[in-house]
Amino acid sequence: MESEREPEQSEERPQQDRLESFFPEYHLVVMRQCAHMVSTVMARHIEQELDRRPQPRWITFVDVTGARFRVRADAIEGLEQSSRESRELLRRFREERDREDPPESFPF
């Protein structure tokens, strides 16, 4: 089964490298059904809006592709920062974990 996973990972990695070269650091606006990539400046704007009292009912923001969104403030579940360093650490952690417990050993 290992050989089946390797081509998948090798195809996925170059695409991931291309994305990271365009967006070395970004933030994710996490919602129940989706997540949107935004710049650091836009993440600060969203954070300030969420911290306002009284909290606004709607928050408007623009993602890294330039698409404009207007969402209910209470639909935003979190903001997550993603940098090259944090993504590399997460990849290394997952690789180590997979070596210890190969994915096919999980019952689900």
Image: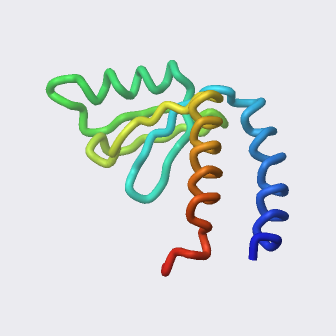
Task: State the residue at coordinates (58%, 59%).
Answer: 100
* Residue 46 left/right relative to 55: right
Q: Position of residue 46 (x, y in %)?
A: 39, 28
Task: State the residue at coordinates (56%, 38%).
Answer: 37
Task: State the residue at coordinates (32%, 45%).
Answer: 72
Q: Position of residue 51 (x, y in %)?
A: 24, 25
Task: State the residue at coordinates (28%, 30%).
Answer: 50
Towards the viewer: 73 or 104? 104
Assign the N terminus to one quadrant of the image.
bottom right
Q: Position of residue 52 (x, y in %)?
A: 22, 23
Towards the viewer: 50 or 78? 78
Q: Position of residue 64 (x, y in %)?
A: 63, 33
Towards the viewer: 94 or 59? 94
* Residue 5 left/right relative to 63: right
Looking at the image, residue 64 lies above or below residue 40: below
Looking at the image, residue 40 lies above or below residue 63: above
Q: Residue furthest bottom?
A: 107
Q: Residue furthest left?
A: 54
Towards the viewer: 3 or 99? 99
Looking at the image, residue 44 lies above or below residue 91: above
* Residue 86 left/right relative to 80: right
